[in-house]
Amino acid sequence: MRNAMIIDGKDNVAVAIEPIAKGDTVTYAANGQDVSLTAAQDIIIYHKIAIRDIPKGEPVVKYGEHIGIASQDIRTGEHVHVHNVEGHRENLEEKV
């Protein structure tokens, strides 16, 4: 049974669609197939879980968009939230 979801193939986090306990199997659909991993920590409903290792300094991608930068190494299955992601504002102004 799926208990998480991703929207875009570029995502490196999934969103929990129900509470997930440490050690639970997390399952989400990707490219038409179910993918599973083990939760390394408790994940609150609607919070993010890393679906692969995210090195410090790498963008965190949700729904195909950068939502922040990993402020520390984040391991597969870990909770992804303000304690390990820092805000990052991209320069959206066109350079002439």
Image (cartoon, helix red, strand yellow):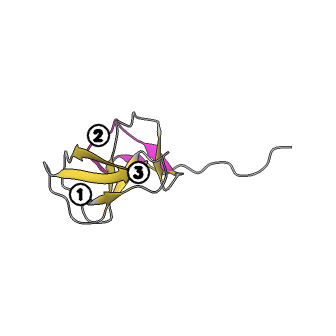
Indicate left or right for 74 with 10 as reference: left
Provide the secondary structure element on which disc 3 rests: loop
Please name the residue shown 40% across and 51% down the image.
32
| Mark linked to residue 76 | 2
Quarter of the rendering occupied by the C terminus: top right
Amino acid beneath label 1 = Ile
- The crowding category of the residue bearing disc 3, from other C-alpha atoms within 10 Å (few below 14, some 14 to 19, many at least 20), is few
Closer to the observer: label 2 or label 3? 3
Indicate left or right for 33 with 86 as reference: left
| Mark linked to residue 32 | 3
Quarter of the rendering occupied by the N terminus: bottom left
User: CB of mark 1 within 8 Å of CB of mark 3?
Assistant: no
Question: Residue 48 versus residue 14: which sits nearer the camera?
Answer: 14
Residue 60 seen in the current view: yes
User: CB of mark 2 within 8 Å of CB of mark 1?
Assistant: no
Amino acid beneath label 3 = Gly
Residue 24 screen position, x and y as percent: 15, 52
Residue 67 screen position, x and y as percent: 49, 53
Circle count: 3
Mark 1 and mark 3 lie on one chain; the one further toward the N terminus is: 3
Residue 82 seen in the current view: no
Q: How far apart are the two marked residues, 2 and 1, measured between alpha carbons?
A: 13 Å
Indicate left or right for 29 with 1 as reference: right
First to last magenta residue range:
67-85
Q: In the rendered view, would you say 85 is above or below 55?
A: below
Mark 2 and mark 3 lie on one chain; the one further toward the N terminus is: 3
| Mark linked to residue 43 | 1
Provide the secondary structure element on which disc 1 rests: loop
Please name the residue shown 41% across and 55% down the image.
6
Amino acid beneath label 2 = Thr
Provide the secondary structure element on which disc 2 rests: loop
